[in-house]
Image (cartoon, coloured by chain):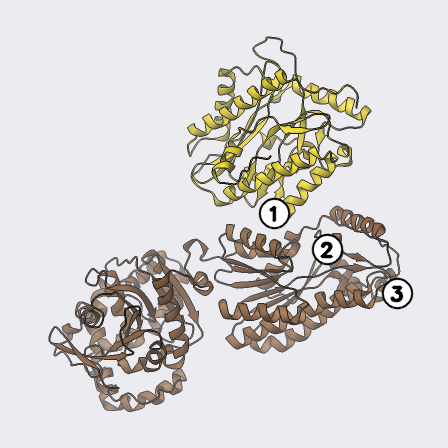
Chain colours: A yellow, B brown
Amino acid sequence: MSEAWIPSAEELAGFRKAQRLAYDCAEAITAEMKPGMTERFVAARMKEYLLDHGADDCFHEPFAWFGDRTAFRGLIAFKQLGGFNPAFYPGLRRLEENMPFILDCAPTIQGCTADIGYCGVIGRNAILDRLMDDLIEYRQLILEQVRARRPLAEISRAVDALCARHGYDPRHKAYPFETLAHRIEKLKDDGKKSHLKIANFGVRNIGELLRDKIRGAREGWNPIWNSSDASNHVPTPGLWAVEPHLGFREVGAKWEELLVVTDTDAFWLDDDVPHVRRWAQRGLWKQAA
Amino acid sequence: MTPSQIVQSGGIELAVYEWGKPGKKKPTIVLVHGYPDAASVWKATAEILSQRYYVVAYDVRGAGRSSTPDHTAAYDLDHLVADLAAVVDNVSPDKPVHLVCHDWGSIQCWEAVTTERMEGRIASYTSISGPSIDHASYWIMNRLRSGSPEKIAQVGRQLAHSWYIGMFQLPVLAPALWKGGLDKLWPTLLEKVEGIAEAEPNPTQTRDGANGVNLYRANFVKRLLNPQERRTELPVQLIVPRGDKFMVQEIWDDLPQWVPNLWRREVDAGHWLQVSHPELVAAHAAEFVDFVERGVESAALKRARVREERRGKAHSGKLVVITGAGSGFGRETSLLFAEAGADIIAVDINLEAAERTAELSRLLGAQAWARKTDVGSIEDMQSLADWVEKELGAPDIVVNNAGIGVAGSFFDTSDADWERVLRVNLWGVIHGSRLFGKQMIAAGKQGHIVNVASMGGFTPSRFMSAYNTSKAAVMMLSDCIRAELADRKIEVSTICPGLSITNITQSTRFVGASPEEEARRQQSATKLYQKRNLKPQTIARAILDAVEHKRAEVPVGVEAHGSRLLSRFFPALSRRLARLDVAP
């Protein structure tokens, strides 16, 4: 691959700021959430929060899924549209006590885009706890294998195999193109306060993804990282928004984070994220040497 | 039996019997008898329990060698509880005791554990065949008010079982019967109706029968018409004899509403199980006492604990053994049974995978255990069966699912390949069916054995001689044992899945192929199966369906149905197709 973009330390700081904002947003809105609220209401609150805190564009508008929609059961599982399923958009499902939820938002600040996934429950849900505990293994597996420069399709299949071992459904396969991860590119900081969105997706970010697709087709790589043969290439340098999404019965859980891939190495953009803090609290997290 | 002491209670003399000596670390068990019995009904049970506990029984007022009150009101439950308290204060002044009560003894003790009089004096309560009259009254009212014909029928059936209670309300009749010959007839009646013989006829049978009628007269009508809400936080173990002629099992259904800490064990016995099965009663009582004293809950008790949210499901309370439970059909079947209320024993040669299945089953609310077992090894299977029988009792459902694949030319299939595939696919099913079938027969369980074969069992193929032979054998084996077990009402189902995605394609041995070629074929077989997309969940659902509807043979998937029809109606075509070289 020619002239790969490897983000500078300064650029990484920009992306880290965007990712922090996204996770702060999820945590702040979670603190407000109460039984009876709808997905649409919560998603709108997230959007408001992001705009209030400096977001000027997005990869996509915030998503919120409640109850069995976290595991993409029901209409949302309809795959015949290739993942482009309107049921993904926040709906009128109301939150109940002990019902799992997922918040997913992707703000852009000054050209730097983050894409995060956050899950939780108002009350208690044993299945969600178990899923969230097990998600640590996916974060470790993906990083280890990217560092070992394994082909991305192979890593994606290793994720599938880990799901099978755990007894979970890999629900990220319900996303468009069965996406385990997708590229994030740096946009120009044009100083504008807002940018065009179509069907809840940021036009500039999707444009970058399409450009990557064309360029990737020429150079033999795929900006969508999944188990297909198109992803059968070594990790491409740059930023990847990685989002393993597990489902067990009526409960789904995920995290989503930016993975920084350089020519020789890889690392997660930020270890100070809510799910890592949760693993640390539960004694599951051991800082990699 | 001679009383060891007489305890005074409100002007009544109670005859108390003891087995063993009190000791600092020895729990005290107090046994309370029912009607028309005396303390002697506990003799055999008490003797067994006294090996480890200090055991006390007494004759209830009016029965055995205790004195008789002179009026019916003196049989009021308040007095009966006071009697129990007097005995307990006397035999165990410092430590709370464990109650084990039967029939009317149990009715009295419900009063004792749900009222304040004996607070702090009782550590646990094992109740056999005697509900609280107050609970029974609510039970009846709730069902009559529900308007559900099924629930009203339950009340009708219970009333039909309680005919004698109505009769006891009539003046003169019942005591006169006891005095006029029923007492002499009683041992014969017990033997004829209940199939039990008392070691020696009860010498006080006449007064036990005649006086005891007052228990009913003093309490039944009063309590039934004006029940109180009676609750207890104490640990309560319910022993429910399935063959009880005086009680319908549904009478206990509402109990969790009053008793949050409840364990329920059903046993194959009649009403007087302490006479017919003293070892069983002693074992259950001891297990519960030990649990309450030491806090260690045995596997059987864990299973017996009543979990409100698990009740009323299709397979509530059933115990299911599943082999090959670490992945594929086995794991999905475990999870579906767990969701349907059953408890799971997940068996696999890969312990880690079995543990994972057990853990997922627990997340779905089941009690679950994982066991590492090579189903082809008789030693392994015997030790699995022994463990299950000892810890949990005979299973209700056994799914012999573990299987391995082998493919390739007959002439490349070595003796070792044949042995390997027959050992797991056929011998595993033989062992599982025989060992657990025996347990079901011994326990009188009307259980279900599910053997997972394959469409290969009726689909000849030039490159699947070993695998398909093993599966055809499983089908015939199932047909034979189904016939033999029909008398015992134990069902046998054969499941014949089509091309379903599991690990089996990735681990199938392709004989006559180099390791690289084998890996390639495994990959391509897996891809073919993925394209077919017949999910393990579908097979698991077929297994539950087979159990629920007692189906004998269940092909799963259109290819399995098609091939079965072909083999039945167009066998020549089936044989012709077998020649096609469609190996992946």
Q: Which residue is mark 2?
A: B504
Question: Circle 1 sits in a helix, a strand or a loop, which is it?
Answer: helix
First reached walking from the N terminus: tag 2 or tag 3: 3
For disc 3, the chain is: B
Question: Circle 2 sits in a helix, a strand or a loop, which is it?
Answer: helix
The disc at residue B411 is 3
Q: Are marks 1 and 2 on the same chain?
A: no
Residue lying furthest front: A289
Residue at the image position 44 percent from the left and 36 percent from the top: A122
Marks 2 and 3 close (CB-CB < 8 Å): no
For disc 2, the chain is: B
Residue lying furthest top: A191
Q: Which residue is mark 1?
A: A166
Q: Is residue A36 above or below residue B427?
A: above
* Any part of residue B12 in sight: yes
Residue B305 in the image: state x and y as whole percent: 41, 60
Give the number of callouts: 3
Q: Are marks 1 and 3 on the same chain?
A: no
Residue B484 in the image: state x and y as whole percent: 63, 78
* Any part of residue B568 in sight: no
Q: CA distance from mark 1 to mark 3?
A: 39 Å
Q: Please name whichever residue, A77 or B172, is drawn nearer the observer in this view of the structure.
A: A77
Residue at the image position 70 percent from the left and 70 percent from the top: B427
